[in-house]
Image: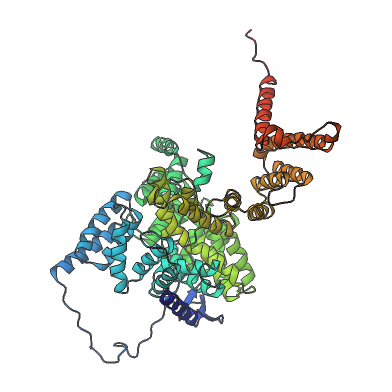
Amino acid sequence: MMRLVMWATVAVAVLLILAPTQTHSQELTESGTEKVVDPSDGTEEHIATDEGGEASTVGEEEVTTGSEGGSSGEEGKKDKKPELTQDQIRAKELYEAALSLLNQTKEEERRAYTLLEAAAELGHTGALDKVAWASLLGRHLVHNVTRAAIVFEQLSKQGHADAQMGLGFMYATGIGKNSSQAKALVHYTFGALGGSQLAQMALAYRYWAGISVAESCETALTYYRKVSHTVADEVSLTGNRAVQKVRLLDEADNPGSTSALLDDDLIQYYQFLAEKGDVQAQVALGQLHYQGGRGVEQDHQRALNYFLQAAEAGNANAMAFLGKMYLEGSSVVRQSNETALKYFKRAADQNNAVGQSGLGLMYLHGRGVEQDYRLALKYFTLAADQGWVDGQLQLGNMYFSGLGVRRDYKMAIKYFNLASQSGHVLAFYNLAQMQASGTGMVRSCLTSVELFKNVAERGRWGELLMEAHAAYWSGAHTQALVTYTLLAELGYEVAQSNAAFILDRHHTHLFHQPQAFARALMYWDRAASQGYAVARVKLGDYHYYGYGTSVDYEAAANHYRLASEQQHNAQAMFNLGYMHEQGLGLKQDMHLAKRFYDMAAEASTDAQVPVALALAKLALLFSFRYLEDFQWLWSGEWSVEETLGPDWDIYVMAVLAVLIATLILLRRPPPPRPA
């Protein structure tokens, strides 16, 4: 144990040595785009653009060499690489073929993992890593924790960063390994230093929340910034990524009320309308397949088909999105500035904001037209005035960099804030950069960390949220739990609450019941720390009933009070009223009980019926207490508990509920008489 603590201490010391200083300076690139230089890691942090813009390079490392021929200065001197064997050549071919199929449709991804398994059998390191993760999460392969642990152990000995992350996760959660936070911290540290973005996120979250390490905002900022560079770069190339956050608890309590997913019948209805020539349905389906999300896979081929049909009918939105597709280029359409410009102009001529923004981007970077900052500013302003998020983002970039306009950080912040209100990830990224460097505002480490965390959670790994959701509702509860716990380690609050929900309902036998309650308590606590009110109420319930911990009414009351004061949660107010009524963990006070019951009714209409019952019971209790005060009128002692039993309040509530239901039925208007 002492060795593990020593290794953890050494790892933390390495982190602190590598942590960046707070000194930042600003320069201008040759093109006029401002960059923020962090001297600690030698990277340049550009304010990010979108839609494939040339100024969107993020986290780009400058490498200087001693001479034109190479860093050694000796021309023509190259290390000889060992020749590959036939098996290695075959493994490489299989691996590259698999990579070309990934991030496509689900069917192509399944084919990709078949190829990855074949490459892994031939010893390909990258394939082994992906197969291990797929086995751990049950993605396209059979769920096999033991297999994953063996491969991670093997690869980690070779210094593989993602394998270090895998082992760290298993030690942190006790899945496949005996739980050890010290070992988890060591593996996370080496994985993060090796470049694993998942490990960097896990470490960033731990330093941000102070889990098993001393809380350190600056260290969290270092790692969240590294991950955000990559995410922002990917968004610049592929568009704004949609991450669906669905709570299992909300779905269980309100079946059919989830708005994050589109119903299959609704999609089929739109498809029917689109086939009949409904232009609005074609545009809606095109955007849905173009961006993905809400339970619909991203499919650029189908998006292209729908946009082409709508564009032929003269729809400006469809023309503008066709322009975006041709500007970015993909496996479906070949990149073409000329075609993109044609569609953007046709859309802009109809005063379409998406087309105006696209046209502004063409002039900003001189793609297909001569570069003209004045025209770029004009079109971005027109788009932003109509509330289009990309126009707002680009206006912020121009004011930040002083392109075609006087540099104005306040205006840049204004437009970045507007774009962030629409959820644009690059707006969050740019605001985080400005907060971290104190550009145009007072530097705030906490605010910049929260913004970078938001960006990091928009990475491609965020798609695992919907995979876990689908696995849960298909009955693969263990697979869903493992995926949610992985995302919980990365700091996703929704994943933490969903993992706690699965453990709370005992939907999986991965952990025994007492251990499951203790782990659920931990995840409720982490979710509550990130502001989820229901998780805070759950923490109160766990301490009240003694789930995963000892019964502690005072701790329960404290959690209910926090949920009541900070989030105005009606359930927490009701519970506080009951605890004041019964004198559990709080001073018995009927007046305070009534006050909290009334507050609960005001906070939520759903609480009005339970509050009405509770207040009726409270009135009876007042009467009984009054009789007890005058017990000297008859011989002997008398109390409610002795007469009706310790659970008398439950019986009274049941009787009152029946009476209220009867009154409601009696007061219903009679049915109309037939004429």
Whether 248 is drawn above or below 412: the answer is: above
Residue 374 visible here: no
Comparing 152 with 298, the one in front is 152
Residue at 66 percent of width and 39 percent of height: 607
* Residue at the extreme top: 675
Applied colour scheme: rainbow
Q: Dividing the picture into quarters, in which one does residue 80 lie? A: bottom left
Q: Is 667 on the left or on the right of 523, as rendered?
A: right
Establish if 115 lies above or below 318.
Answer: below
State the image coordinates of residue 282 (x, y, percent, origin top left): 43, 42
Q: Is residue 246 above or below residue 378?
A: above
In the image, 545 versus 236, the foreground residue is 545
Q: Position of residue 454 (x, y in %)?
A: 52, 62
Residue 127 image point, x, y percent:
26, 63
| Apparent side of residue 455 relative to residue 78 in the rendered image (left or right) | right
Which residue ends up furthest to the bottom in the rendered image?
74
- Screen quadrant of the N terminus: bottom left
Q: Quadrant of the C terminus?
A: top right
